[in-house]
Image (cartoon, rainbow, N blue to C red):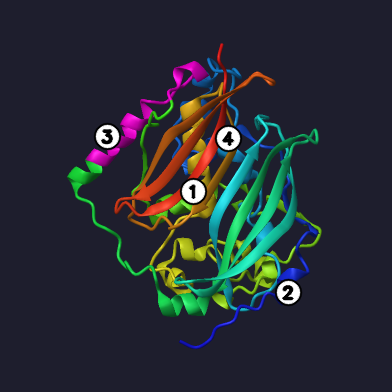
Amino acid sequence: MADVQLDTTDVDRWVGVPLGGGTLKEPIHINDIRRWSQGMQNANPLYYDETYAAGGRYGRIVAPPSFAVCTDTGHGATPAIQGTIPGSHMLFGGDEWWLTGRVIEPGDQLRQERMLFDYRVTETKFAGPTMFSRGDTTYLNQRGETVAKQRSTAIRYLAAEARERMQFSEAGDPQWSDEELERLAEAQLAYLRTLRGTDKLRWSDVTEGEALPTRPIGPHSIASFTTEWRSYIMTVWGSVSHHGRSSTDAAGWLPEMSRNRDRAAVDPMHADGLYHGASRGHVQARYAQVIGMPRGYGYGASMGAWILDYLGNWCGQWGEITHSNAQYRNPAFTGDVTYLNGTVAGKHHDAATGEYTVDVEYVMTNQHDAVMAKGTATVLLPDD
């Protein structure tokens, strides 16, 4: 195999530089939260049913813990996609989150501070020389309060090399019988019946080693991936204003995966991302194969949201996720089913602060038991 090089010269000048980017023009609307829960297939009525939510901690609908990334204009990944690497594409490699406990609610208006943190280049079977770059996005509300910080890992690689190697080779969707689909539907309903709703989970109720309920998601489809994409507010035409410097649009995307700003001035579809742009491979098999994928595949940011929602649904409204660090291993492809499982790995009481915390180890797998993601989280719980 010919020696392949990844030129990162242009990336170096962006490390540690404060970045601009997009900002949502309008405050969060209650239907943005409802649409997000729908897109993430998180059927927790606390996030869409105002009557049900009235009996909860806040007495109204507030956003789930995953919602911060919905207020960004690039899945929190744009700080990790700086500098031009011609002929490259990217996949999500992981997300680390620090949450402050401040909820997002209708009427809030968030802005982001962004910076490329660091990067390294290593050899992978998928694409040869591959960059793993980390970028930080800090989410602040209209009062200047930090709501969350996200450190997103972008996997940047040469699309032609990935296409030649084609490590992901299952070209067709798996087929599910009516009986299998019915069992899956029953499993999804069984998970939803475990939701804590307006009840309070206390630290003393939790046992080290106990298993969290299994959350099935899927089978994934073009329809479900499209619904996910449209739940991100920034995908609405005209919803974003841009400011400051960022090189994400000039990252070296292939022509087939690029946005055409001149045409978009007449028809926004040409910079929409899903119809034209870097996200079209998620829902169009033709373009998935251009970047080394066999068929439509899911969004890394949505995987991160599934994890945060899974943890949030388990600990309930009186619990708080303070930290989560996930590594992504395999995408969710069309036709696949995703399973989330977790285990209580530890319990801690800090006598100095009075805080009660729980460590959770989680893993995301598909129907073949291939690991899609794994990580750890810290959850703050009440004990009164």
The amino acid pointed to by label 1 is Met
From the viewer's perspective, is the residue at label 4 or at label 2 nearer? 2
Q: Which residues are magenta?
A: 183-207
Residue labelled with disc 2: 10
- What type is the residue that disc 3 sits on? Glu
Is 65 on the left-hand or right-hand side of 84? left
Task: Find residue 66 and report its image quarter.
Answer: top right
**Residue holding disc 3:** 186
> Which is more N-terminal, label 3 or label 2?
2
Q: Are marks 1 and 3 in contact (CB under 8 Å)?
A: no
Going from N to C along the chain, the mark reached first, 1 or 2, is 2
- In magenta segment, residue 27: no
Q: Is residue 33 visible?
A: no
**CB atoms of marks 2 and 3 within 8 Å:** no
Who comes first in sequence, dot 3 or dot 4?
Answer: 4
Identify the residue at the far front of this view.
Answer: 351
Tell me the CA gap for discs 1 and 2.
Answer: 30 Å
Residue hosting label 4: 65
Quarter of the image for the N terminus: give it: bottom left
Instruction: Residue at 80% x, 33% y: name it.
Output: 143
